[in-house]
Amino acid sequence: MMMSVGTVWLAEAGGLFDLDATLPLMAIQFLVLVAVLNAVFYKPLLRVVDEREEYIRSNQAQAKELQAKAAQLTRQYDQELAVARREAQKTLNAAQEQAKQESQAQIRVAQQAAQAQIAQAQADLAAQQAQALAQLEPQVQSLGEAILAKLLV
Amino acid sequence: MDGLTSAASVLAAALAVGLGAIGPGLGQGRAAGQAVEGIARQPEAEGKIRGTLLLSLAFMEALTIYGLVVALVLLFANPFAG
Amino acid sequence: MVWMWHGLLGAPLASLEVGEHLYWELGNLKIHGQVFITSWIVMALLIGASLLGTRNAQRVPQGWQNFMEYVLDFVRTLTRNQLGEKEYRAWLPFVGTLFLFIFTCNWTGILVPWKLIELPAGELAASTNDINTTAALALLTSLAYFYAGFSRKGLLGYFKGYLYPSPIMLPFKIIEDFTKPLSLSFRLFGNILADELVVGVLVLLVPVLLPVPLMVLGLFLSGIQALIFATLASTYIAEALEDHEHEEEAEIA
């Protein structure tokens, strides 16, 4: 197909700006294309995209809800933990207190016992001393008389 | 077509394209320069500036194309060819 | 008229055609066959890709669905940026299809070696290189924004917006209604045709390697053109939907 520009120069009627029935037919054809593409392209794909957005949005809302629930559970757990810890501390303190009291009571008892023993020992000692003194009394008497006799002799 | 008409047509076609390219050429150069300046000042806006630049360049280009269309009419669909 | 490149190369790839059409007769109407052939292929591509992507649409996208969702996201962002969160849903099919159709037309026009397929007249190329296609799309855009304005504010309410912000603007606004489709159609048509011509001329001069970077540039530019067409269409629709009266109240308040 060898048509040179030179021949086109002489081409009759219309040529470059040949407006004819192509124009309205093309317009109609284009409108048909718009309708067809609307049916097979825009509508179905937009529906899919919208559905997806809806799905993502609902999923996101659900996820947010779950997240809030999880946060609440964490908070609750923390609270419970704090309460438990406080309770444990209280129990511990009470036990410590009790142990201290018990030990102090025991110490007191032991001290009393020791005191009693000491008193007993002191009493015994005093009795023995008295006894010894009482025994020595006549001896002292006789010894004094003997000394006196000796001196007087 | 007689000789005078074709001579005038060819000359007019050449002038239509040549003169028609001057204005848009200046305009495009100015627009591109400003765009580069804008990008230099605000590199983060490069994408937006580029898009707008291309669009406005095409609008200016259209003016040259109108001249070309006139030239084509004179060459290939001359109404005075008789 | 002697064209320098006329006799230089004889390869079929190195021919350049402008304004040649494969005419089909439809009753007593003439239509451009090559435009319809490529546009049907593009439409088949678009519909096929969509069917492939949505045939088994899953919540977790797989394979081709990923790509189609990326495409959807792209046109959705484009439309939403212009029309706002509230309005864009209704106009997404129109604006999105504008972008996809123009983009696919442009890219197939460059990437598919259409010229290897011989036609009795004319040649296959991107259907957006025909003024009929771009004018049809631009006029549909005009109708779309008129429809948007009318359905939102009523016939009178819409045209009252032409007096905003001052009645001096009225003639400009009316002229704008004509220049909008004109500039839309010519911008797209001119850009695509210019790309093809530049590549064509370069292929005529240097048929190896040199045209490749220009074709890559063409890919880039034609993608931008599709983006611009869709962006402008949605901007026009957004403009028509704009509520000036409430705006004024808001400004006063």
Image (spheres, coloured by chain):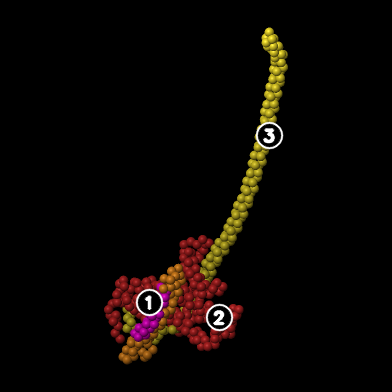
Chain colours: A yellow, B orange, C red
- Crowding around mark 1 (Cα neighbors within 10 Å: few <14, some 14 to 19, many 20+) is many
- Measure the C-alpha gap from mark 2 to mark 1: 35 Å
Q: Are marks 2 and 1 on the same chain?
A: yes
Which numbered dot is residue A115? Answer: none
Please say whether residue B26 is one of the residues in the magenta stretch. Answer: yes
User: Numbered disc 1: what chain?
Assistant: C
Q: Amino acid at mark 2?
A: Gly
Q: Is residue B26 left or right of residue A68?
A: left
**What range is drawn magenta here?**
B14-36
- Crowding around mark 3 (Cα neighbors within 10 Å: few <14, some 14 to 19, many 20+) is few
Asked where in the image residue C108 lies, by quadrant, the reply is bottom left
Quarter of the C terminus of chain A within the rendering:
top right
Which numbered dot is residue C149? Answer: 2
The vertical placement of C226 against B80, above or below, is: above
Please say whether residue B13 is one of the residues in the magenta stretch. Answer: no
Q: Which residue bears the numbered disc 1?
A: C195
**Residue C162: % across, % down:** 54, 85
Q: Give the camera-side residue of C42 and A113.
A: A113
Which numbered dot is residue A105? Answer: 3
Please name the residue shown 64% across and 46% down the image: A86
**Residue B81: % across, % down:** 36, 89
User: Numbered disc 2: what chain?
Assistant: C
Asked where in the image residue B25 lies, by quadrant, the reply is bottom left
Overall secondary structure of the magenta stretch?
Answer: helix
Q: Give the camera-side residue of C87 and A94.
A: A94
Please name the residue shown 44% across and 77% down the image: B56
Q: Is residue C222 left or right of residue A80?
A: left
For numbered disc 2, what is the local secondary structure? helix
**Residue B32: % across, % down:** 40, 75
